Image (tube, rainbow, N blue to C red):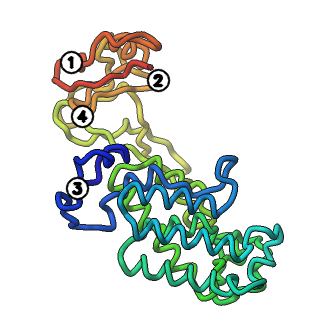
């Protein structure tokens, strides 16, 4: 059921009776990930406006309970004057009756959604409400129960008293893992890049390795061995190069599927057969930049259809 756009739900293609809720918390995970707004901008300048937008998204997805939850948070934000003060110190000091209820209610909502397995909503609330405080936040002296040390040694804590940063971090890590498992890599990267927690934010700073395999025998490819000496020690290093030979089938790999020459720049490959080549030759085969599509099938004839023309 986690397929298509929100507009698809306006038709009667998906009725509540036709949906089998094997995992109700992820039925619309990709739609929520694409439609939720988590950070303020010129169109949604306040946290309350973000909540109302997310309430509309949940209502369109026929998730009425989530829609009411977002509307409740928006009403409490307006009633508590949480956003009127520019000084973060005042955010932890109740100014009216609604202010006393805001933080305990948010904490209860987060725990309730976490117990239901809905880590997406937990992370969305944390992002909208900016629950994770930056290490240099002025509130660091007012909330001691959630305080931890960040990777840089600075004080790190949450906005809600009694809500441990370790628990919030587990929600983020679980949600990011879900996004990656569903191939929603752009949404996962955006969340990691904008998270205030240094531990989560550092996930994008780790090196990325792409493992190659021979397009003929499908065995892993290793680079060419380069040797260097340091004193009496002989060191071996694997250097990636296009002019390599598969050690299993002895076939030269890394050749362009159009000109049959070694590729020494950007390499574009077919996900079906593993062959590839120069990006310029590939774009020329499929139609080129800004031109209409000439061909849609792999040049090797493997049967894979795709369009690399730059629209």
Residue, disc 3? 15
Q: Secondary structure at mark 4?
A: loop
Residue, disc 1? 300
Which comes before the other along the chain, label 3 or label 1?
A: 3
Which comes before the other along the chain, label 2 or label 1?
A: 2
Residue, disc 4? 214
- Mark 2 closeness class: few <14, some 14–19, many ≥20 residues within 10 Å: few
Residue 94 tag number: none
Which residue appears at 17% of the width and 18% of the height?
Answer: 301
Q: Is residue 295 above or below residue 31?
A: above
| Quadrant of res 65 | bottom left
Which label sits in the foreground, 3 or 1? 3
Which label sits in the foreground, 2 or 1? 1
Examine the rendering and report whether any part of residue 5 can be seen: yes
Callout 2–callout 4 Cβ contact below 8 Å: no
Q: CA distance from mark 3 to mark 4?
A: 46 Å
Q: Secondary structure at mark 1?
A: loop
Query: For this rendering, which residue is in front, 1 or 200?
Result: 1
Q: CA distance from mark 3 to mark 1?
A: 44 Å
Which label sits in the foreground, 3 or 4? 3
- Mark 1 closeness class: few <14, some 14–19, many ≥20 residues within 10 Å: some
Callout 3–callout 2 Cβ contact below 8 Å: no
Callout 1–callout 4 Cβ contact below 8 Å: no
Residue, disc 2? 265
Image quarter hosting the N terminus: bottom left
Q: Is residue 12 above or below residue 248?
A: below
Which comes before the other along the chain, label 3 or label 4?
A: 3
Query: For this rendering, which residue is in front, 280 or 58?
Result: 58
Which residue appears at 39% of the width and 49% of the height?
Answer: 184
Query: For this rendering, which residue is in front, 176 or 302?
Result: 176
């Amino acid at each position: 059921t986690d397929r298509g756009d929100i507009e698809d739900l306006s038709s009667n293609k998906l009725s509540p009776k036709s949906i089998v809720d094997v995992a109700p918390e992820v039925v619309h995970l990709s739609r929520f990930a694409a439609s939720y707004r988590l950070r303020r901008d010129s169109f949604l300048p306040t946290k309350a406006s973000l909540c109302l937008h997310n309430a509309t998204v949940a209502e369109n997805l026929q998730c009425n309970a989530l829609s009411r939850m977002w509307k409740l948070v928006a009403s409490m934000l307006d009633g508590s004057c949480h956003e009127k003060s520019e000084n973060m110190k005042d955010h932890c000091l109740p100014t009216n009756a609604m202010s006393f209820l805001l933080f305990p209610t948010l904490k209860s909502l987060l725990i309730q959604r976490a117990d239901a397995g809905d880590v997406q909503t937990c992370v969305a609330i944390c992002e909208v409400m900016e629950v994770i405080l930056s290490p240099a936040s002025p509130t660091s002296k007012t909330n001691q129960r959630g305080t931890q040390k960040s990777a840089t040694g600075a004080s790190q804590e949450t906005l809600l008293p009694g809500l441990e940063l370790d628990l919030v971090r587990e929600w983020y890590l679980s949600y990011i893992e879900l996004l990656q498992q569903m191939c929603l890599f752009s949404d996962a990267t955006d969340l990691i890049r904008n998270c205030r927690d240094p531990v989560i934010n550092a996930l994008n700073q780790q090196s990325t390795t792409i493992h190659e395999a021979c397009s003929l025998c499908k065995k892993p490819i290793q680079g060419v061995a380069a040797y260097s000496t340091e004193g009496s020690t002989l060191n071996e290093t694997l250097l990636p190069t296009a002019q390599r030979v598969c050690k299993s089938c002895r076939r030269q790999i890394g050749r362009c599927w159009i000109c049959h020459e070694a590729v020494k720049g950007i390499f574009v490959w077919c996900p079906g057969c593993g062959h590839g080549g120069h990006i310029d030759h590939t774009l020329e085969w499929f139609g080129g930049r800004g031109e209409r599509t000439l061909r849609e099938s792999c040049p090797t004839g493997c049967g894979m259809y795709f369009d690399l023309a730059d629209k």
